[in-house]
Image (cartoon, helix red, strand yellow):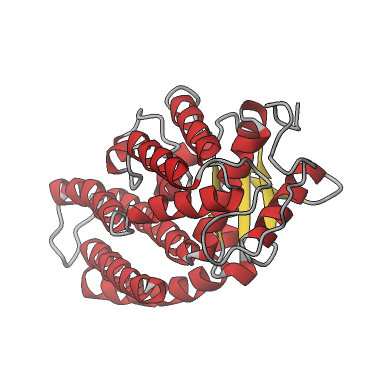
Amino acid sequence: MNYLRTAILLAGLTALFMGVGYLIGGASGAMIALLVAAVMNLASYWNADKLVLAMHDAHEVDETTAPELVHLVQDLARRAGLPIPRVYLMDNPQPNAFATGRNPEHAAVAVTSGLLRMLSREEIAGVLAHELGHVRNHDTLTMTITATIAGAISMLAQFGLFFGGSRDNNSGLGVIGTLAMVILAPLAAMIVQMAISRTREYAADELGARTTGQPDALASALAKISAAAQTIENPTAERTPATAHLFIVNPLTGQRMDNLFSTHPSTENRIAALERLAAEIGSGGYGARPSGPGYPGRPTGPWGSPGGGGENRGPWG
């Protein structure tokens, strides 16, 4: 289903891309846009993850540069029955995270430095497990490709401000039409992004909570990230709002119009769902064996205590 949805999104975004090209350059502009879209679709499938990581200035870390973080991701991936993803760190004060990659074998998870500073180790585990839930559900292909193409459409629409309004063209587009295109094309791209089902976040929340065995830690992490995102700006996300749907919590502060088109369900509803899950499965703490089907996890976590004990502070300071 995710591959079918990806194909539909690619077709819809390509059509939108051609429409913008037509408004800028008429029939010839549409044909050029079609060729560009075809190349972009292929490039997006193979390299969208690299593009998104570069947009957010993420750099890869390993057991030498960030051993605690990398070991935690490795442990959670094993518990979720997934290949070990690459791990990236973004030097960004806002606590947040996202996953990317075309399939579980080519996945990556990225977290901000703000996340490591502000959350406890159990909360960080919940966030990482949520992102691995997206990887397991194959959400990352749709989410990443949509981000790259929607961002390209927004840039193309802005080019129309310079090319469409500065000269006459075969489409008869005037200054007013150009301004309307510049506004409506990014708006249409955002609406297409909303076609990505919001239920994916609930599903990833549940998978993440079952992987760690601690739904309340993920709920606490969501509350902290959501509150911080309203006051701490995420500079790279504000520059590339088409990638906002990738993050565990909407990273836009609300200073831009783009924030009106969030693809995330409300944090309150997600926390309520996690509280119901906690009542259902209990909260044995990180390291306890998950209760859901298909979790070949180890009985203890990387912090050494079967019940996920230890003091409630992050290992990064």
Which residue occupies the extreme right position in the image?
64
Q: Is the residue 75 above or below the residue 116 in the image?
A: below
| Between 245 and 58, the one nearer to me in the picture | 245
| Between 253 and 128, the one nearer to me in the picture | 128
Residue 52 showing in the rendered view: no
- For the image, the number of numbered tags is 0
Residue 222 showing in the rendered view: yes
| Between 163 and 8, the one nearer to me in the picture | 8
Residue 134 percent location from the top left of the image = 50, 58
Q: Quadrant of the C terminus?
A: top right
Residue 177 percent location from the top left of the image = 15, 51
Q: Is residue 284 left or right of residue 277?
A: right
Residue at (40% x, 29% y) in the render: 253
Q: Is the residue 102 above or below the residue 227 in the image?
A: below
Q: Quadrant of the N terminus?
A: bottom left
Residue at (34% x, 33% y) in the render: 256
Residue at (80% x, 51% y) in the render: 62
Q: Is the residue 119 above or below the residue 77 in the image?
A: above
Residue 159 percent location from the top left of the image = 34, 53
Q: Is residue 74 left or right of residue 54?
A: right
Residue 27 percent location from the top left of the image = 22, 75
Q: Is residue 267 left or right of residue 47?
A: left
Which residue occupies the extreme top position in the image?
231
Q: Is residue 190 left or right of residue 316?
A: left
